[in-house]
Image: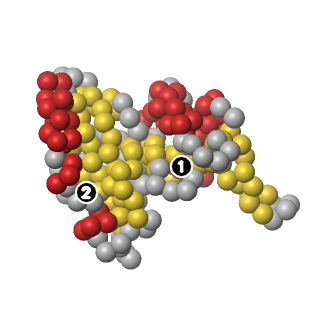
Amino acid sequence: MTTEWFDRVTEELQDHLNSICEEYDQVGHMNINRASKHPRIEFFVSTEVEERDYFCTILFDPYNEEFYVESFDVELHQPTRIILDDITDIVEAVHESFHEFLMDDSDRELVFMGEDDDDGMTVEEIDVEWETPEVTAFLIDDEIEVTYQFGVDISNGDGVLRRVNRIWTDDEEIEDETTFTFKKDEASTIIAMIASHMDRLVGYDETLDI
């Protein structure tokens, strides 16, 4: 069992998706979840009604080293797998699912950069070119998720580290987002400081009742 092929494909996938189509480039997002038996790549958009609206999930079978999407055979009345042989098949599956998703609800209002927040105040957002997808650092299904994403501020070349903490309750999803920017000269110092003090840190399993 290995996830080497999964890691290679996900590293290249973002570049392919950037040119998938104009609509996806504006609103499409990708999240990598390795914290499961079958790692998966989830695709979603942000809406004014919900925090996330998922439209496609690509799964990876580490035993057979193959990507697939789950479907349902109406004749056999059982779930089936559609194998995706290469990155081109994956991109096509995402593209098709994205447009089917848009057609299913043409009235859906998508959230673009620079729109007003809930208080009616204009949100000033930096123009970031994301170098990685949103990667799950910690996950308890339907309870808590912590993700990170790295990018570069196009205007000044700063590094941008985005952290999103999501907590699900019985009634709602609570999302807390923080962004940290830094210069190239600072990166090695930040990495070294964290690495030198890893033994002093505690994990979620030591702070949560899990």
Q: How is the image coloured?
A: secondary structure
Foreground: 138 or 129? 138
For disc 1, the marked residue is: 40
Whether residue 140 is visible, yes or no, is yes
Residue 209, image x, y percentages: 31, 75
Query: Residue at point 66% right, 41% down?
Result: 66
Residue 10, image x, y percentages: 50, 36
Residue 53, image x, y percentages: 47, 54
Secondary element type, mark 1: strand
Query: Residue at point 68% right, 39% down?
Result: 84
Q: Left or right: where does residue 155 sit relative to residue 142?
A: left
Residue 128, image x, y percentages: 28, 31
140 in relation to 178, above or below: below
Q: Which mark is residue 169?
A: none
Q: Left or right: where does residue 190 sit relative to residue 70?
A: left
Q: Earlier in the sequence, mark 2 or mark 1?
A: 1
For disc 2, the marked residue is: 176
Mark 2 crowdedness (10 Å alpha carbons): few <14, some 14-19, many ≥20 = few
Amino acid type of the residue that numbered disc 2 sits on in the rendered structure: Asp
